[in-house]
Structures are given as structure tokens and as C-alpha cells.
Image (cartoon, helix red, strand yellow):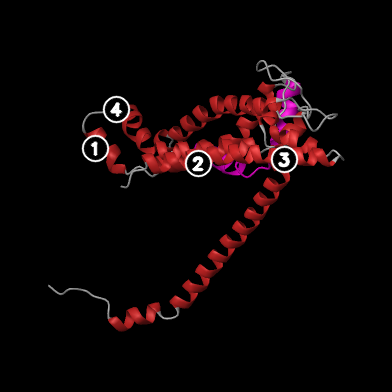
Amino acid sequence: MAVLSTPKSAVELASKGRPLKEHLFRVALLSSLAIALIFLGMLLIYVLEEGWPRLSPTLWENMPSIRRPETAGIQSGIFGTLWIIGLTALMALPTGILAAVYLEEYADRTRWYNKVIELNISNLAAVPSIVYGILGLGIIARWLQFGFTVMTGAITVSLLVLPIVIISAREAIRAVPPSIREGSLALGATQWQTIWRQVLPASIPGIATGSILALSRAIGEAAPFLMLGAATLVRFNPEGVWSSFTVLPLQIYNFISQSREEFHVLAAAAIVILLAILLLMNSVAIWLRNRYQKRW
């Protein structure tokens, strides 16, 4: 029996000219990465230098003030952000994961309504956040009469991050090898038992990483809250889901818009706190991915 092999001359002809293109492409990628890191480093250094004098416990212990910037803090913004992110996680994550399970494991992709759902999810992931703010203002705040409350902000941000959660969860579920499902079904497990005991545990790293990154995006959003009329100066912490609130991006916007230099220093310190929260969440996402990731 003859063994088929590729002639050496054919391989050389196929790879001729490829090293130069690969090197150029690699140089372009590394250059883009270096430029992004340089600008990010310059931004971090500038913010740290500007806000270092105000990085003290009074920053997160005191309430904001427009009269005494030397003693003003960002406590209400921190608590408002935690309220919004907590409620967003409770609403968006279960809904997004269950939707991903349905689309990957149960949905018949030949049905027209499933095609419409998938198309709309892809389109909604690219919609600007200001559009969700307009939606929240017109429907949730006014039509449903929820007002400018924590619940309104949380529902709006949940709609913002829901497509991202669905897409990331679908990719994580899709990465589980079909042999895992086939082996479970062959042993007599039902489809839901296979999903609950085999597929979801194996896809936890990808789902957790995508969910945390989606919530990280929600923390830095300011446009939806501006449309919802969230107050930029709140001197109390939210007491419930129907309470008024503010978030860190809005407080930073309010401080920067002031003319006095002390407020700019305060805004830089608040930016450092916001970046620290984002870096902490991203670090947790990386740790979860490396801790529970499986190689198939």
C-alpha cells in the first residue's frame, strides 16, 4: 500500500514568501499592543500623580460636597455602584445563562423565531449604551412609573449587559466537547441532567469570565444614568431599590465639571478607586479561568 506524502519542493513553494508576511503581521500586532500599553501606562501614571494627595480613608468614608472639596468623599457613589452591580448580577446573569442554555441545547436552529432571537442578540450587543438609557427613561422610568430609582438603573444596565452575557455563555457551552454529552446520554441521563451535571460545570470558567467582564463594563457606564436623570450629587447611601442613587462615573463627571482645582484632584482620586474596582474584578475573572479551565 503506497503512502501518500507531500513532495519537499511543493512544501517549499507553498511556504515561500510566508515568513516575511508572518513577521510583518507579528510586528504590527506587537506594535499595536505596545502603543496601547504605553498610553494606558501614561494615563495611570497621570491619574495616580494627580489623585495621590486625596487617596486616604476620608475619600471613601465621607459624602460628596461642592463647598468643601478638601473633605469631600465618594461614599454614596461607591454604595450606589455596589447596589446597581448587585441587582444587575441578580437579574442579568441567571437570565443570560438560561437563554444561552436554551439556544445551544434546546433550540431548533431551523425555526425562524430562533434565527430572529440569535440575530437580535448579536445586534443588541453592538447598540450604544446611550440607547439603553433612552429606553430606560421612556419605558421603565416613565411608562412603568419606576421613577429615577436604583431599580430603574439596575434594569437598564441589565438590558445593556444581557447580550454580552448570553454570547459569552454560549461560547463557553459550545466549547464543551460533544463526547461529554454523548457519554452522559449513553449512560441513561436525561438531557437536563446532562446539562446540569456535565455541561454547565465544564463551562463555568468561560461563563464566569464573560459575566464578570460584562459587569465590569457596567461599572464604568455613565451615559445610561445621565439619560435616567440620576443625581450627580447625593449625600446619602441608597436605602433600598426604590431609593435615589448616584454612581462613581457620575460623581467623577460632576467633580471634573467644577472649576476649582481641588475638585479635579478629587476626581482623579475617584478614578483611581474606580480603576481599582475594575482591576479587581478582571483579576477575579482571570483567576477563575485559570483555576477551573479544562483542556480537552
Q: Quadrant of residue 264?
A: top right
Q: Quadrant of residue 226?
A: top right
199 or 148, nearer to the observer: 148
Evaluate whether residue 109 shows in this view: no
x and y percentages locating residue 167 in the rendered image: 51, 41
Which marked residue is nearer to the observer: mark 3 or mark 2?
3
Question: Is 246 situated above or below 55?
Answer: above
x and y percentages locating residue 255 in the rendered image: 79, 36
> Residue flagged by tag 2: what amino acid is it?
Ser
Q: Which residues are magenta?
A: 114-143
Which residue in the protein does label 4 denote? Answer: 190
> Circle 1 — which element?
helix
Between marks 2 and 1, how big is the CA–CA gap? 35 Å
Dot 3 or dot 4: first in sequence order is 3
Determine contact: label 4, label 1, CB under 8 Å: no
Determine contact: label 2, label 4, CB under 8 Å: no
Which residue in the protein does label 3 denote? Answer: 53
Q: For mark 3, does the 10 Å Cα neighbourhood hold few (<14), some (14 to 19), or many (20 or more) residues?
A: few
Give the residue drawn at x 83%, y 29%: 68
Dot 2 or dot 4: first in sequence order is 4
Give the residue drawn at x 77%, y 38%: 253
194 or 64, nearer to the observer: 64
x and y percentages locating residue 63 in the rendered image: 74, 25
258 or 241, nearer to the observer: 258
Which marked residue is nearer to the observer: mark 2 or mark 1?
2
> Circle 2 — which element?
helix
